[in-house]
Amino acid sequence: MAQTLIEGVTNYWCRTQGIHYRDLDTHPQIDDVVILIKFIEEYQRDFTAKQRIYSYVIWDWCYKQRKPLSNKYLKALTKTIRQIESRRTSKQKQLRHTRQKIKALRTLP
């Protein structure tokens, strides 16, 4: 019973990620695929159009063509992460500044 439930949940997760359940056991680059899934899950809402397209290229290379992530792709993923984190930090600073400005305006007599 518990095994069936685990398989069902795992199968559902695989379908939501765009992979097949059987690939967990048979895909030669499943570790790289999982890395890509985690990467896309975390950063996709902040991708630029170019980054989104490039992530699909990397996905096709690794998942569909069953090839390992090369250093070229790993460097590209690292660069993308740095860019997105930098944008996130800038947005947070801008929001903090705006909030402080609003608080200052509220306290004026």
Image: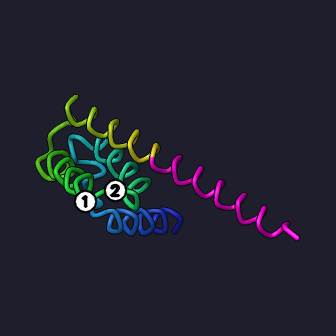
What residue span does the magenta drawing correspond to? 87-109
Assign a secondary structure to mark 2. Answer: loop
Locate residue 32, reporting x and y percent.
29, 41
Labels 1 & 2 near each other (Cβ < 8 A): yes
User: Can residue 6 be found in the magenta stretch?
Assistant: no
Residue depicted at x 64% and y 60% = 98
Locate residue 94, reporting x and y percent.
57, 54
| Circle 1 residue | 49
As drawn, is 68 to the left or to the right of 9?
A: left
User: Can residue 105 be found in the magenta stretch?
Assistant: yes
Residue depicted at x 35% and y 68% = 16
Residue depicted at x 28% and y 64% = 18
Instruction: Identify the image quadrant of residue 53.
Output: bottom left
Can you name the residue that lies furthest to the front here? 109
Residue depicted at x 22% and y 54% = 50
| Circle 2 residue | 47
As drawn, is 20 to the left or to the right of 108?
A: left
As drawn, is 36 to the left or to the right of 102?
A: left
Predominant SS of the magenta segment: helix
Circle 1 packing at 10 Å, graded few (<14), some (14-19), many (20+), is few
Relative to 90, say whether 109 is above or below.
below
Relative to 68, say whether 41 is above or below.
below
Relative to 106, say whether 27 is above or below.
above
Residues 45 and 105: in front is: 105
Q: Distance between the residues labelled 1 and 2?
A: 6 Å
Can you name the residue that lies furthest to the left here? 65
Type of the residue with mark 1: Ala
